[in-house]
Image: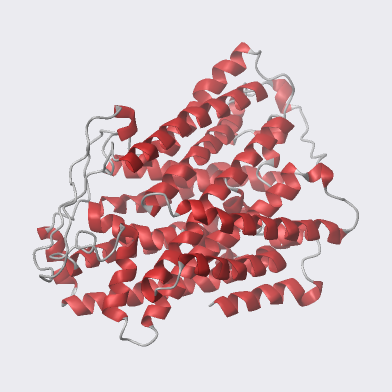
Amino acid sequence: MLASSAAIGCYFGLSKGGQRSALDYLMGGRQMSMLPVALSLVASFISGISIMGDPAEVYRHGTQYWTIVLSSYLASCVVSLVYAPLYIKLQLNSCYQYLKMRFNESVRKMASALFVISQFLYIPIVIYAPALALSQVTGLNVHVITPVISAICIFYTTIGGLRAVVWTDTLQTCLMMMAMVAVFAMGVARVGGWEHVWQAAERGGRLEFFNMDPNPLERHTFWTVLLGQFVYQLAWCATSQGMVQRYLAVPDLRTARWCLACFAFGMTAVKWLSVATGLLLYASYENCDPISSQRVSRQDQILPLYVLETAGHIPGLSGLFVAGVFSAALSSMSTGLNALSGVLVEDLFARWIPKEGRFGAALWLRVAALSTGVVCVVLVLIVEHLGGVLQVALSLGSITSGTMLGLFTMGMFCPRANSKGALIGSLASLILNGGIVFATQGALAQGTLRHSFLPLSTDLCPENTTTIILPTEPVLETWPLLKLSYMYYSLVGAILVPLVGLPVSWISGGRHRKMSPDLFSPFVHRWLTPEDQQCDLKLDEK
């Protein structure tokens, strides 16, 4: 898999003179076809975190997580109807160019910096998850695996640009699905069929599909997963350069909408398979929980342990699993590096980048991709000291994703919002939401806050196995706000931006310059003034 990915990078980086312009390197010349872009969207969102974390989540907390499937369809529909048409009509190279046109350069710089920060928080976790899997299966040191696999990803991303990233994503998506299907099929056959898996899940109380409790302090209910993941995925698909870059690389809006529809379908397949695999894990370890029996130290290691114990004797199957986890991780990492290079060169440091020659911009984009890749590998050292991989990734990512969604949405739907409101609203969202997230992570690390999970058994573990008693009830002596479901972090961040930004805009006098109606969602055109309707859109920066 690694060799094939490197070969794809070499092909697109060296054939036909390579990627000589920023448009080719970042957007594929806006001529990418639908199928590889659609698969790339799925691969970019489904990381090693999902492959490792989702089944473990179902194993310990039940199947309510399935509601994320509905969230994917809702988010794809909203992006197709609201955000994608506006971006494609403006023909942007970076979604953060919109913020300069709608507000000013300061807002654009702030949003670009937030994206860079979010990626530096997210990519190290993406690298760490598959390294953890390979370490569990082979016994190799995580700190040896991390630089090796990252070097391959950095190589093909740096030299091949978006075309290489999209086509390696296509390959990696196929390998990822093959690995998940192979492990699931083998596991179901081993326990005696799906009926036995379902019966074990019923005995263990893992089947929960419609917990309609509206309490936002409950970790997973129908509403927390549906609303929380809808906002989280909407933020990624509508305001993250790595995702927006994909559907801006296709020729027209119709193709972009097909890509987003296929993204929702692909998410459905992967998430349902993850939920089913989580139930399979419970059926296999129903009477001897590997965490309580100290065979693994954290829940993210349960799936690699299962593959090692059940498929280690089958030549190639454990290798296919590792290749699948790496595929999911490398696709997310390459997406992040490619998008980071574009934001750094096009948005943050454009004034210092030499403009002469078509090759100059592409060269600096490669330098940026290489540099950010090295930094992310170093940051892996911090990730290993955090808690569960899935919740940490979603929690830290929600700090910036919710703020970004609130900022873009306020710009598109609130004609009277101005740059002061955008800046102050975004900062307030970051500070308040970030305070909640980091306080919660600190409470979890100190043991003053624990999330309850469903009962686990060690009744049939071998007699010589040392077991530990895990608490199944949450610690109650803590600030109630820290118990807020981590699914709602993005929603809180998105709401805070207009909640603070609109009053600030009103106090500071509202919008101070004319703007084209093309900068606003068509849903609010009826409220624009006649002066706005007569204003022509200028794209001087392009």
Residue closest to the eye, 162 or 47: 47
**Left or right: where does residue 283 sit relative to residue 340?**
left
- Residue 216 x %, y %: 30, 34
* Residue most extreme to the right: 356
- Residue 220 x %, y %: 28, 44
What kind of colouring is applied to the model shown? secondary structure
Q: Which quadrant: the C terminus?
A: top right
Residue 123 seen from this side: no
- Residue 71 x %, y %: 39, 48
**Left or right: where does residue 380 sit relative to residue 14?**
left
The image shows residue 174, relative to residue 30, as above or below, that is below
- Residue 18 x %, y %: 78, 70
Residue closest to the eye, 501 or 293: 293
Q: Identify the residue at image location x=85%, y=61%.
A: 359
Q: Residue 407: which quarter of the image? A: top right
Residue 470 seen from this side: yes
Q: Identify the residue at image location x=31%, y=74%.
A: 307
The image shows residue 456, relative to residue 145, as above or below, that is above
Residue closest to the eye, 22 or 217: 217
**Left or right: where does residue 353 sit relative to residue 525?**
right
Count every numbered label the image shows and give the total: 0
**Left or right: where does residue 396 sit relative to residue 362?**
left
Q: Residue 3: which quarter of the image? A: bottom right
